[in-house]
Amino acid sequence: MHRTLSRWLAAGFAGLSLFAVSCDMAILRPHERAVAAAGVAGGGAMRDKGPVLAVLGASFAAGTGAGSPRQAWPEVLADTIGWRVVVSADPGAGFVAGGARSLGPLDRLLPKLDLPHLHPALVIIQSGHNDVGAPPALLRAGVEQLIRLVRMESPTSAIAVLTVFPTGDHPAQAVWDTDAEIVAATHSADPHAVVFDPLVSKWHFPRLADGLHPTTAGHRWIAGELASGLRADGVVHVPTEPAARTSHS
């Protein structure tokens, strides 16, 4: 299995290019500063107390295409629901994939969120695209292990998984297979987890020329979809007048 994984990683990352947005294992956001001041990470000005959104993921979570972290979907979503946000992400990372800077897989990025001290109301895991082609058993084990780790470190947190974003409009069968494996493993590890499946749901939003990553407008669209879905599932209650509104048109 280790040789299989090594061959897959070598093939998967041979052509990997560095994304425009570089992301540390933990990124300080304006909404995170109240958490940071409490000693979780870094420092900054204290903000009003409120629920914390923790985001763990790859290039989409890191804000690739957004222009700035402030315009990436984690930040926009936090503005929309009125929460603080903490992000740990590395472009190219996955449930199995190591990432552009070899900071992954995601279970290696997880400790920087410091969930036992953070006590987030919600943890969103964004991953899947970089794991396309991974051995199914290895991928399933990676998903189940990560979700169980999150549940162990933060038992009261709601968990949401944002699965595969395809490149273009005609994804290969391997993309569908990877997505199905992630969804099945998520439900197996935590039947109460909320799953957002851009592939099956046929999400369409403004993208960069690479046909994969969202533009700034695309990030706003994703944040809006997540806010609507989380509200429908009773995970969050969106304020009547959120700080940042998202259009679905």
Image (cartoon, rainbow, N blue to C red):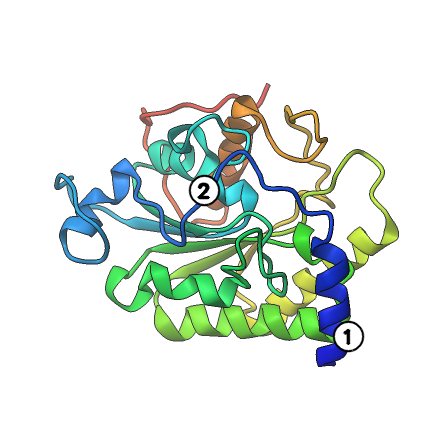
Question: Residue 14 appears at what percent x and percent y?
Answer: 73, 53
Nearest to the observer: residue 81 or residue 134: 134
Q: Give how far apart the Cα atoms at labels 1 and 2 are.
A: 41 Å
Residue 184, disc: none
**Relative to 24, is 202 on the left or the right?**
right
Which residue, as the protein is rendered here, is positioned at the far bottom? 1
Eye-nearest disc, 1 or 2: 1
Q: Residue at x 73, y 37 (%)?
A: 202
Amino acid type indicated by mark 2 = Arg
Quarter of the rendering containing residue 46 = top left
Nearest to the observer: residue 51 or residue 27: 27
Amino acid type indicated by mark 1 = Thr
Question: Residue 210 appears at what percent x and percent y?
Answer: 70, 31
From the image, which quarter does the C terminus lie in? top right
Q: Residues within 10 Å of mark 2 (few under 14, many from 20)?
A: some
User: Can residue 214 be seen here?
Assistant: yes
User: Can residue 155 be seen here?
Assistant: no
206 up-or-down from 89: above or below: above
- Residue that mark 2 sits on: 231
**Relative to 224, is 237 on the left or the right?**
left
Nearest to the observer: residue 26 or residue 80: 26
Quarter of the rendering containing residue 85 = top left
Question: Residue 120 appears at what percent x and percent y?
Answer: 32, 57
230 up-or-down from 154: above or below: above
Number of numbered discs overlaid on the protein picture: 2
Which residue, as the protein is rendered here, is positioned at the far top? 249
Q: Residue at x 36, y 72 (%)?
A: 153
Residue 4, disc: 1
50 up-or-down from 153: above or below: above
Name the N-terminal-most of marks 1 and 2. 1
